[in-house]
Amino acid sequence: MRIALTRDSVCAGDDVFAQHEQTVTVDDALPLGEAIGRIASDYLARISCGEASWVAILDDEPVAVVAQQWKAPRLHPGYETRTLRDGARLHFAYHVQEDPEKTFATRRGTRSFQG
C-alpha cells in the first residue's frame, strides 16, 4: 500500500529541501508501530546531538512519539492494534530536543500536536 509522508524541517539548512514530501510503499500486514519505525528510520532527519523528538500524526491524529534515542516508536494507548491503510497521510511534527518522555506524556490521548 502507498503512504504519503511529510515532515517538519529540523533547521534552516533542512528548509532547502522542504516540503519533505514522499510517497512510500509499506507492507499492509505490518502493525502500526513497526510500520512507523521502519518509515522513520529511513525518512526522518537526524540531528547531531542524537536526541530529536517527533510526533507521528496519522491522518490528523497523533498516534505515536518517535525519538532518535529510542529503538522503536511509542504508540499512544488505543493504537496498538491499528494498521496503516492505503492512501494514508503520515506527518512527523518535530519537537526539537524536547524530552520524548514528556512529549509522550503530554500528547497521549490528545489531538494536540503543536508546540
Image (spheres, helix red, strand yellow):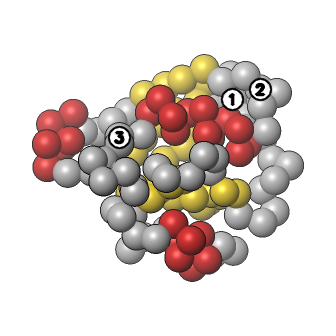
Quadrant position of the C terminus in the picture: bottom left
| The quadrant where residue 106 appears | bottom right
Residue name at image x 78 percent, y 66 percent? 77
Position of 16 with respect to 84 (left or right) is left
Regarding residue 60, the answer to whether it shows in the image is no
Badge 1 crowding class, 10 Å Cα cut-off, few under 14, some 14 to 19, many 20 or more, is: few
Position of 7 with respect to 90 (left or right) is left
Nearer the N terminus, badge 2 or badge 1? 2
Nearer the N terminus, badge 2 or badge 3? 2
Give residue 64's position: percent from left, percent from top.
62, 57
Residue at image mark 3: 45
Residue at image mark 2: 28
Nearer the N terminus, badge 3 or badge 1? 3
Residue at image mark 1: 86
Is label 2 or label 1 in front? Answer: 2
Residue name at image x 78 percent, y 56 percent? 79
Distance between the Cα atoms at labels 2 and 1?
A: 8 Å
Give residue 46's position: percent from left, percent from top.
35, 42
Give residue 66's position: percent from left, percent from top.
54, 53
**Camera-side residue of 86 and 56:** 56
Regarding residue 71, the answer to whether it shows in the image is yes
